[in-house]
Amino acid sequence: IVVSQLMSMLTQESTDNQPAAAPRVGIIMGSDSDLPVMKEAAKILNEFNVPVEVRIVSAHRTPELMFSYAASAMERGVQVIIAGAGGAAHLPGMVAALTPLPVIGVPVRASAVDGLDSLLSIVQMPRGVPAATVAINNATNAGLLAVRMLGIGDANLKARMAQYLEDTRDTVLVKAEKLEK
Ligand code: RP5
């Protein structure tokens, strides 16, 4: 499967010839090599029926595209941006500098130093320009955090997140019970 096919599968398709809902979350990443990690964020958002767009945007290789993406995201209706990158992972921080939207950074393990470079590049933002940072390769948590952010103004999403937590707890309790037997 080619990358473009995978990316359009991750972006919710329109049904019944209705135009696709405007994306509420932008998922961007520095390279198509980040896609195996970053697709987990799209999966979570699809589970919660949150419309997303998925794009390759590189801080270093396509700086003009990064600028125009970040500068236009809010006016296009995007409410949260999830940005993943590896190595010298400047994408989340640079995007946070270009938009007032909340930005969640995903440090991708992409180099010889096991993702520590990506983690530190994303988490060590200067005062005044925050980027939330999840664990290395944990795009699932980035998706869940985006749902929680959107849930502030969306009672339905907030209720579904409460249910997700209950389901997570129940899964662990069932496993624990099995172990005790
Ligand atoms: C970063 O460099 C990307 O986010 C990726 O994690 C890493 C390696 O990119 P490729 O050389 O695989 O395209 O900019």
Image (cartoon, rainbow, N blue to C red):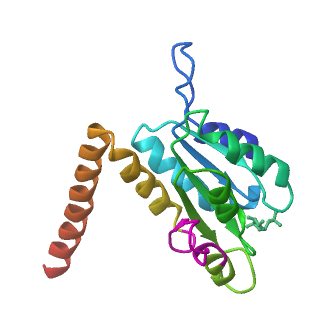
| Residue at the image position 61 percent from the left and 33 percent from the top | 76
Quadrant of the image where one finds ligand 1: bottom right
Answer left or right for 78 relative to 114: left
Asked if the stretch drawn in magenta spans residue 122, the answer is yes
Q: Which x, y percent locates residue 110?
A: 72, 74
Q: Quadrant of the N terminus?
A: top right
Q: Which x, y percent locates residue 3?
A: 74, 47
Residue at far right of view: 61
Q: Is residue 23 visible?
A: yes
Asked if the stretch drawn in magenta spans residue 128, the answer is yes
Q: Which x, y percent locates residue 65?
A: 80, 47
Answer left or right for 42 relative to 155: right
How many numbered discs?
0
| Residue at the image position 20 percent from the left and 79 percent from the top | 179
Q: Nearer the viewer, residue 120 or 172?
A: 120
Q: Is residue 2 visible?
A: no
Residue at far front of view: 128
| Residue at the image position 69 percent from the left and 44 percent from the top | 71
| Residue at the image position 66 percent from the left and 59 percent from the top | 97
Residue at far top of view: 17
Q: Which x, y percent locates residue 177?
A: 15, 73
Does residue 162 sit above or below 11 in this rendering? below
Q: Quadrant of residue 49?
A: top left
Q: Nearer the viewer, residue 40 or 78?
A: 78
Magenta range is 121-137
Q: Report the predominant secondary structure element of the magenta stretch.
A: loop
Q: Quadrant of the C terminus?
A: bottom left
Q: Quadrant of residue 90?
A: bottom right
